[in-house]
Amino acid sequence: MIKFFRKIRQRLLTENKFSKYVLYAIGEIVLVVIGILIALQINTWNEYQNVRVLERETLVEILANITEIESDLAESLERIIFLNKYTDSVLALLETKVNKPWILERTLHKAFLNTDGQIQIKKVGYETLKNRGVDIVLNKELKNSILHLFEDSYVLMSNSFKWKIEDKISDYMLKNFNPSPSEDGILYSPYDYGFVISDNYFNSLMQTHQLQTGYFHSVISYALEDTRETKALVTKELNIKNP
């Protein structure tokens, strides 16, 4: 092909057809430029397709992570509701001061089951996204939702778990209750029921515990709502039904 064009140029020059040679040269330049532009377009398209593959792989990984987190959050909410039920029973007993130590014994330990509220946030997919660059996600709404979920919702929730009074509760129970194993778990029998039922400090601990679990309930509910919204956007983007 190159020899063909070279022969045309030589023939035009030998025939002194300068004007035609100029037009031919211009046409040849135009063809070269068009060829370069086509090559660049193909290269850009290939890069675009490669980025789309990375985007999909990353979103699939994020979807797997937040689906697992969603399950953990929902389970944690159920546990907190369970805890609050027994915390309310203990507080009602402290308020009425009814002489029923067996109620305190069989209720108190259930109010403190797994009260730390810790939930492991799976961030493998999100870390992959950050390493590859968040802009590989073209859908702006989806990108902002993912960023908000991992940088705001989950961070707020994790920081909230730092507020705990378990150490103070444990110290109090070690001093004032006798632990004994049972099929229902560890039961705590008060050494002096009259003292415990009238102790303002114990009442304060229980009320603070109730506030704490209530706060956990709020931040976990908020995180769960954001998780489900982001999950729906990712699912829609991946065009997946019933993930």
Image (cartoon, rainbow, N blue to C red):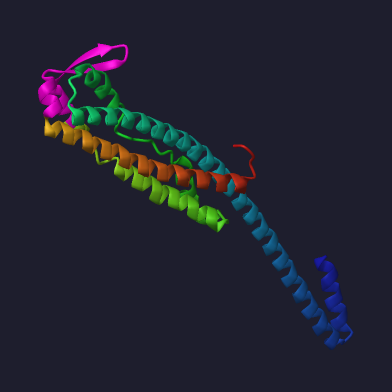
Q: Nearer the viewer, residue 109 or 23?
A: 109
Left or right: 167 with respect to 67? left
| Total residue callouts | 0
Q: Residue at x 32, y 11 (%)?
A: 183
The x, y position of residue 8, in whole percent, is 86, 75
The quarter of the displayed image where residue 98 is located: top left
Quarter of the rendering occupied by the N terminus: bottom right
Q: Residue at x 24, y 24 (%)?
A: 108
Left or right: 207 with respect to 224? left
The x, y position of residue 219, in whole percent, is 36, 44
Q: Is residue 156 above or below residue 204?
A: below
Quarter of the rendering occupied by the C terminus: top right
Q: Residue at x 24, y 35 (%)?
A: 209
Q: Is residue 150 above or below residue 207?
A: below
- Magenta residue span: 169-198
Q: Nearer the viewer, residue 91 or 189?
A: 91
Residue 234 shows in the view:
yes
Left or right: 216 with respect to 35? left
Q: Is residue 71 magenta?
A: no
Q: Nearer the viewer, residue 128 or 113?
A: 113
The x, y position of residue 175, in whole percent, is 11, 23
Q: Is residue 223 above or below residue 8?
A: above
Q: Is residue 164 above or below residue 19?
A: above
Left or right: 219 with respect to 29? left
The quarter of the displayed image where residue 208 is located: top left
Q: Residue at x 49, y 52 (%)?
A: 145
Residue 133 shows in the view:
no
Q: Is residue 176 magenta?
A: yes
The x, y position of residue 218, in whole percent, is 36, 43
